[in-house]
Image (cartoon, rainbow, N blue to C red):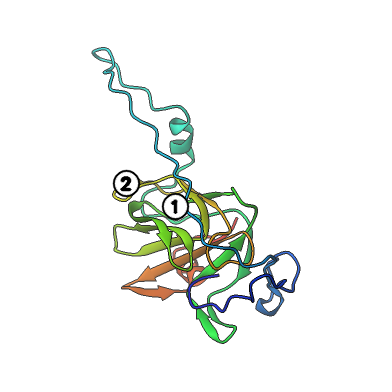
Amino acid sequence: MSPGDPAPPRGAAVPGGPAIAGDPAERSERGTETDLGHPERVEPQQESSGAPPAGEEAAPPAGEAEEQERAAPSGAWVSPADGTLSSGFGPRWGTFHNGVDIANEIGTPVRAGSSGTVISSGPASGYGLWVRVEHPDSTISVYGHIDSSGVEVGQDVGTGEQIATMGNRGNSTGPHLHYQIEVGGEPVDPEQFYADRGARLLG
């Protein structure tokens, strides 16, 4: 759920079962509204200041080599998180939903949809906590309702690199990722955006 979506009354149960993919009319989220919280900062690992012996290349930090092997080519787009599509782009509950919601458990890894530079990382009204990444073609991807951020403003991230964990902060009715794509400053349908590039939003 994103800013502008009507929130259920505080303390009231929200009808519907677990989020499932399918017809938009059948998609729902489960939970209740939660209070805004402050992020639990996850500081990036410090790089070693030691130089490798002459003629030898420095080994990448633990886990980085494996991450690089899984990373897609620069400019490609990958799924931002594992889960089910619980809400699509477009009109919803009398308002307009500017992205898609991907539901899963709190702590599920959230990945950069494509390579770029972090332009926002921290509290955001309605979203609770978010990360925004600007990509080389000026497209911006938004990751809202996250539980924790692992990146800082100005940091470069690779395609598929973990940047956060899924949460339930802000105006949210259950654990999920609000994923938004902006082209020319305007939100576009992430499903169509991915399809136009031969990419899959989920899976």
Q: Residue 90: percent from the left, percent from the top?
A: 53, 80
Q: Amino acid at mark 2?
A: Gln
Residue at numbered disc 2: 155
The answer to which of marks 1 and 2 sits earlier in the sequence is 1
Element type at mark 2 = loop
What's the distance in space between the residues labelled 1 and 2, CA to CA?
Answer: 12 Å
**Nearer to us in this view, 26 or 37:** 37
Residue at numbered disc 1: 112
Q: Residue furthest top?
A: 53
Q: For residue 132, say whether it is visible.
A: yes
Q: Residue 198: percent from the left, percent from the top?
A: 48, 62
Q: Residue furthest left?
A: 54
Q: Nearer the viewer, mark 1 or mark 2?
A: 2
Mark 1 burial class by Cα count in 10 Å: few <14, some 14-19, many 20+: many
Q: Amino acid at mark 1?
A: Ala
Q: For residue 79, say whether it is visible.
A: no
As displayed, is residue 45 above or below residue 136? Answer: above
